């Protein structure tokens, strides 16, 4: 038996495993392991029944930690080796994914066995490509800048996370590997920035876009996820001269109210704005403040997976808002292309419904619109191959839901979220290649003799 697997790949790249010189009809087992920074073992295992003398994780069906053919299955399906792990998450605050630095490589030991035949190899997945330069920005713009080190950038992307706050660098790092200058921008819950999602000035995003344009005189896309999608669309509408494309990831079609990060605060009871423009609040659609019975249902559902689905709370308010709602984001004013990505089974809020509302509104404007609807995915559409076997739920510890600790239902299935992430990433690269790189080529031809 011989195992064929790359030694090193980037996070977003496929790592197909092929086994050759097998005995047809005899089961083959594969096992993948990694150890995180807390010395916790995570592993996945699957079994194949080869019909010939070879198998491929891309083409052949397996059973075990994942089912079917899935080239990324061994990596995203890693689970803690400890049995009944989820029962320990609440009482011991155990994590739902391997504890590694966001830019650290992941090292996997992959082994195969068929009868007495064995093979083993190490695979390293790099979050940051070796030819990418990383710069930390400490103010007035805060975040991590990823740039190609030795070649000119193909375009620029401003990357915004959602209600988790801080810096979410994975997407920006992967974009830099594709040749883009990408700034993972922090805008709250970060040193030197506000702690809560309240009264955040949209002018901050304009300043970041100005800074990125001055550094790279290239077409610029703004990419916002979840609550960050609101900031992305509002910024592109308000300052059309700065942006050439928009990506909205698990978006809302409405401006929503802000939230306080203090433990025990209930974001649904918040009426203050998340965003301001010219120092005036941008009004958000208020959620219905939960009554005693809803609080009880929340607390009860959060005590065991899959947790509480907040989608219903948003749905009951969003359905009352039509295209003329004062809270609707006026994307019909955009004159640039937009890509929207949503999981059909998003249980945090109904982002697929929001995408369809954005599509209807964009049809009345001049900008082009493309939507990607992921059938078995929820809110947790991460990067390809992320080791997130519990991507359908989130551990809400010390959160702002009115419940101190518990599980939140993000939706989708782990395998659906993983496959959706791979598809969505390909769409993002295609979209940026079409709408940023082609523009950069046209810009360069303008000045050609």
Image (cartoon, grey):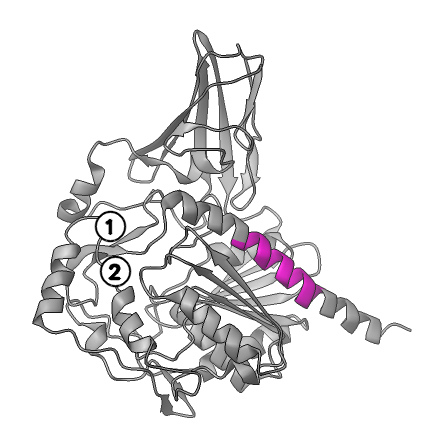
Q: Secondary structure at mark 1?
A: loop
Left or right side of 429 for 120: left
Q: Residues within 10 Å of mark 2 (few under 14, many from 20)?
A: many
- Across and down, in percent, residue 316 comes to 27, 74
Image quadrant where residue 405 sits: bottom left
Asked which quadrant contains residue 442, the reply is bottom right
Name the residue nearer the viewer: 156 or 135.
156
Query: In which quadrant of the rendered image does the N terminus lie?
Result: top right
Residue 18 sits in which quadrant?
Answer: top right
Q: Residue at x 49, y 59 (%)?
A: 373
**Magenta stretch prevailing secondary structure:** helix
Is residue 429 a member of the stretch shown in magenta? yes
Residue 101 placement, left or right of 70 = left
Residue 205 in picture, x, y percent from top left: 48, 78
Query: In front: 226, or 26?
Result: 26
Q: Is residue 141 visible?
A: no
Relative to 96, residue 244 above or below: below
Q: Which residue is mark 1?
A: 306
Q: Secondary structure at mark 2?
A: loop
Give the residues drawn in magenta, as a range: 424-437
Query: What is the number of the mark on residue 410?
Result: none
- Pointer 2 residue: 309
Q: Quadrant of the C terminus?
A: bottom right
- Residue pictured at 26% horizontal, 64% vertical: 310
Residue 324 vertical placement versus 360 (above, below) = below
């Amino acid at each position: 038996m011989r195992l064929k697997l790359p030694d090193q790949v980037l996070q977003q790249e496929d790592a197909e495993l092929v086994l050759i010189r097998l005995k047809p009809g005899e089961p083959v087992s594969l096992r993948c392991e990694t150890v995180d920074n807390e010395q916790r073992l995570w592993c996945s295992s699957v079994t194949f029944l080869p019909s010939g003398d070879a198998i491929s994780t891309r083409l052949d069906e397996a059973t075990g930690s994942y089912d079917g053919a899935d080239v990324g299955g061994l990596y995203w399906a890693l689970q803690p080796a400890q049995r009944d792990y989820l029962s320990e998450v609440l009482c011991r605050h155990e994590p739902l994914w391997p504890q590694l630095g966001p830019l650290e490589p992941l090292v996997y030991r992959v082994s195969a066995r068929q009868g007495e035949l064995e093979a083993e190899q190490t695979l390293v997945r790099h979050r940051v490509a070796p030819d990418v330069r990383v710069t930390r920005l400490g103010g007035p713009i805060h975040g991590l800048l990823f740039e190609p080190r030795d070649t000119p950038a193909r375009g620029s992307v401003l990357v915004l996370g959602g209600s988790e706050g801080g810096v979410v660098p994975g997407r920006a790092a992967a974009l830099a590997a594709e040749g883009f200058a990408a700034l993972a921008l922090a805008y709250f819950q970060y040193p030197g920035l506000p702690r809560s999602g309240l009264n955040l000035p949209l002018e901050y995003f304009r300043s970041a876009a100005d800074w990125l344009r001055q550094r790279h005189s290239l077409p610029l896309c703004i990419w916002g996820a979840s609550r960050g999608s609101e900031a992305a669309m509002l910024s592109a509408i308000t300052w059309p001269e700065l942006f050439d494309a928009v990506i909205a990831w698990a978006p809302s079609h409405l401006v929503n109210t802000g939230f306080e990060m203090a433990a025990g605060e209930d974001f649904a009871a918040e009426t203050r704005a998340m965003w301001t423009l010219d120092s005036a609040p941008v009004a958000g659609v208020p959620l219905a403040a939960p009554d005693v019975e809803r609080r009880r249902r929340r607390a009860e559902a959060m005590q065991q997976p899959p947790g509480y689905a907040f989608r219903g709370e948003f749905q009951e308010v969003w359905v009352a808002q039509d295209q003329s709602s004062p809270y609707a984001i006026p994307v019909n004013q955009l004159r640039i292309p937009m890509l929207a990505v949503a999981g059909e089974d998003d249980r945090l809020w109904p982002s697929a419904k929001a995408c369809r509302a954005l599509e209807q509104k964009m049809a009345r404007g001049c900008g082009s619109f493309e939507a990607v609807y992921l059938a078995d995915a929820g809110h947790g559409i991460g990067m390809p191959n992320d080791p997130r076997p519990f991507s359908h739920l989130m551990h809400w510890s010390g959160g702002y839901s009115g419940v101190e600790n518990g599980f939140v239902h993000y939706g989708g299935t782990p395998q659906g979220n993983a496959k959706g992430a791979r598809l969505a990433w390909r769409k993002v690269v295609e979209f940026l290649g079409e709408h940023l790189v082609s523009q950069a080529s046209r810009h360069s031809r303008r000045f050609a003799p």
